[in-house]
Image (tube, rainbow, N blue to C red):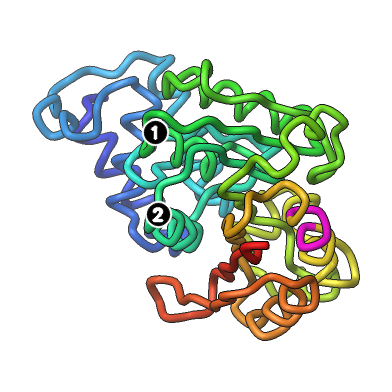
């Protein structure tokens, strides 16, 4: 079969399974399956696909028809203009998290701590935006750290990042950085376990549970981060976290109770509460 016909069949198959954006998804899946830039699919419409090509296309389309997100199938996600490798061990970065990046970029930082780095999309994006910055990134999951390390290598920032296997800021090697970070960022798990069933299937079925839910208490991670971060921030250093859209007031109260100031709840691009930012007091 030629590429043009395979594309048409792929679109039809996806539409038959009620996949929104069928043409967009077909382009991404075909481009990945046959290793061809998506913008060349039309120009290469007469290309004859091999049996191996057709098998890879069929497998990818089957996975998409079963509800698996395109990014999971192709193993990468575009985030803040850069592609990040993702695996089943890390969250699939979403546009909501770019709101945290937007807020962080309001003021440059030299030393950044990324707690629960996952794919590294937050901390590594900031490294790419600030060419002289240094990053320490922690995660409790060794496989997640491996993904972040791979992304650091792809982005060419390995020399400026230190990865630590740690539960938030608990690693002993972090002691040397006490009082040394001018920015701490995190996208912690914030879905209470009883709320997991309400999530969209592409999140519930394919994102790692450890990165979605802290258990019964949706605020558990924020309590830990608020308690730990203060020791690691310079005076007036910033702490910025992603939140669930109903958690703004609660997280604000947690940070206030731990003595942070200039606390603000910020909205994402869809005008939902998505980020809480605050400062360590000057003294």
Q: Specify few, some or many for label 1: CA neighbours under 10 Å numbering under 14, 14-19, or 20 or more.
A: some
Indicate the position of residue 121 as horizontal and vertical percent values. Answer: 52, 41
38 left or right of 115?
A: left
Asked if residue 74 shows in the view, the reply is no
Secondary structure mostly seen in the magenta stretch: helix
Marks 1/2: CA–CA distance: 15 Å
Q: Identify the residue position indicated by label 1 in the image.
A: 128
- Toward the left, the furthest residue is 43
Q: Which residues are magenta?
A: 225-229
Secondary structure beneath disc 2? loop
Residue 4 image label: none
The residue where tag 2 is placed is: 107
Q: Identify which residue, 271 or 70, lies in the foreground.
A: 271
Q: Residue at x 52, y 24 (%)?
A: 152
The residue under the point 74% across, 59% down is 189
Label 1 secondary element: helix
Residue shown at 75% from the left, 28% from the top: 164
* Magenta stretch contains residue 87: no
x, y percent for residue 61 = 46, 41
Q: Position of residue 126 (x, y in %)?
A: 45, 41
In x, y percent, where is residue 3?
Answer: 23, 28
Does 11 sit left or right of 48 as displayed?
A: right
């Amino acid at each position: 079969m030629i590429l043009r016909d395979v594309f048409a069949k792929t679109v039809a198959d996806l539409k038959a399974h009620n996949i929104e954006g069928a043409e967009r998804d077909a382009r991404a899946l075909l481009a990945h399956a046959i290793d061809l830039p998506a913008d060349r699919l039309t120009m290469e419409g007469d290309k004859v696909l091999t049996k191996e090509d057709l098998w890879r296309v069929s497998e990818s389309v089957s996975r998409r028809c079963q509800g698996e997100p395109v990014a999971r199938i192709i193993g990468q996600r575009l985030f803040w203009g850069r592609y990040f490798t993702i695996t089943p061990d890390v969250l699939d970065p979403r546009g909501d998290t770019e709101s945290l990046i937007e807020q962080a970029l309001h003021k440059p930082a030299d030393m950044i701590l990324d707690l629960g780095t996952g794919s590294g999309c937050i901390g590594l994006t900031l490294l790419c935006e600030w060419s002289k910055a240094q990053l320490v990134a922690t995660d409790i999951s060794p496989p997640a750290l491996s993904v972040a390390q791979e992304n650091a290598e792809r982005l060419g920032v390995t020399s400026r990042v230190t990865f630590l296997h740690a539960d938030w800021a608990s690693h002993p090697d972090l002691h040397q950085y006490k009082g040394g970070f001018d920015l701490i960022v995190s996208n912690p798990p914030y879905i209470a376990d009883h709320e997991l069933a309400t999530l969209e299937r592409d999140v519930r079925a394919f994102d790692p549970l450890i990165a979605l839910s802290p258990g019964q208490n949706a605020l558990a991670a924020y309590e830990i981060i608020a308690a730990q971060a203060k020791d690691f921030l310079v005076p007036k250093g910033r702490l910025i976290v992603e939140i669930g859209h109903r958690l703004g007031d609660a997280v604000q109260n947690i940070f206030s109770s731990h003595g942070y100031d200039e606390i603000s709840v910020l909205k994402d691009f869809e005008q939902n509460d998505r980020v809480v930012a605050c400062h360590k007091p000057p003294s």
